[in-house]
Image (tube, rainbow, N blue to C red):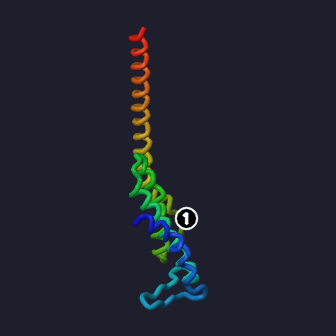
Amino acid sequence: MIAIILVITPFLFYLYKYAPADSNVWETSLITIRSGGFTTVQGFMHQLISKATFVLITTLWFITSRDWWKWAILVPLIMFLFQLSGVVNYQIDYIDKFDFWYALPVITPVIIILIWISHELNKVVGDLDLKDEIEDELERYNQQ
């Protein structure tokens, strides 16, 4: 299922090209899409689909990652989510300008925790390396 989603994403990314480039409203058989704060529906769809595609790919990466540092993936994911909300909420005048500052309170604890975990893991790895060196030295001493 994940492979299918990854294969479909390039097609999703260019889906905006089917929206009318010279209209403020796109009426399909299912829904009506308005351009919101954008000049055309195609511009709105381009921004919406590009942000949604990045959210989708980053979410899949976070969910499928088994590494201890997978929580670092939350940083770009949060940024993409703020950008996506800026596209959907067309009443705001800025997009991609202040999202970093809104995401900072969420990103900062994640980064601090990741730095702490990395520091602790480095200490453990250093201790294990020292233990291996001591065991090798004792083994060489016992063989003499």
Amino acid type shown at disc 1: Lys
In the image, is 92 to the left or to the right of 66?
right
On the image, the x and y values in percent for residue 48 come to: 50, 74
User: Visible in this render: residue 82?
Assistant: no
Number of dots carrying numbers: 1
Q: Nearer the viewer, residue 66 or 39?
A: 66
Identity of the residue drawn at 48% across and 63% down:
80
Identity of the residue drawn at 58% across and 80% down:
17
User: Visible in this render: residue 139?
Assistant: yes
Name the residue carrying label 1: 97
State the SS at label 1. Answer: loop
Q: Nearer the viewer, residue 11 or 39?
A: 11
Q: Quadrant of the C terminus?
A: top left
Instruction: Give the residue furthest to the front.
Output: 143
On the image, the x and y values in percent for residue 135 come to: 39, 20
Q: Nearer the viewer, residue 89 or 65?
A: 65
